[in-house]
Image: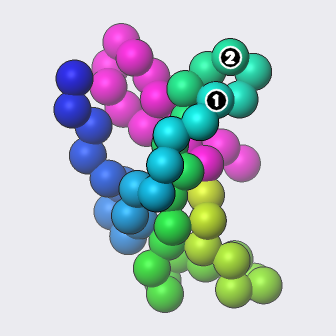
Amino acid sequence: MEISEPNGYSMEYLTEIDQSPVVVCEGDENHVDNFGRGRMNFFINLKTEQLKKVI
């Protein structure tokens, strides 16, 4: 399985939340919140090999 980085993000490391795999990504200058933070968690759907942003 190979999962691509979400557009505007670079993959930093893998972890888990509630026993589900998560990719932690760092956003570029266009993908930051109002406080300037770009780090975002993405759940991995193992069936579809897609990433879903954790809000």
**Can residue 44 be found in the magenta stretch?**
yes
Please name the residue that numbered disc 1 is placed on. Answer: 16
Circles 2 and 1, Cβ within 8 Å, touching? The answer is yes
Residue sitting at 38 percent across and 64 percent down? Answer: 10
Residue 24 location (% of width, % of height): 55, 51
Q: Is residue 4 left or right of residue 19?
A: left
Residue 37 location (% of width, % of height): 68, 77
Please name the residue that numbered disc 2 is placed on. Answer: 19
Marker disc for residue 45: none
Residue 11 lies, with reference to residue 45, above or below; the image says below
The quadrant in which the N terminus is found is top left
Determine the CA span between mark 2 and mark 1.
6 Å
Residues in magenta, as a range: 41-55
Element on which disc 1 rests? strand
Residue sitting at 59 percent across and 36 percent down? Answer: 15
Residue 40 lies, with reference to residue 46, above or below; the image says below
Element on which disc 2 rests? loop
Q: Is residue 46 left or right of residue 20?
A: left
Amino acid type at mark 2? Gln
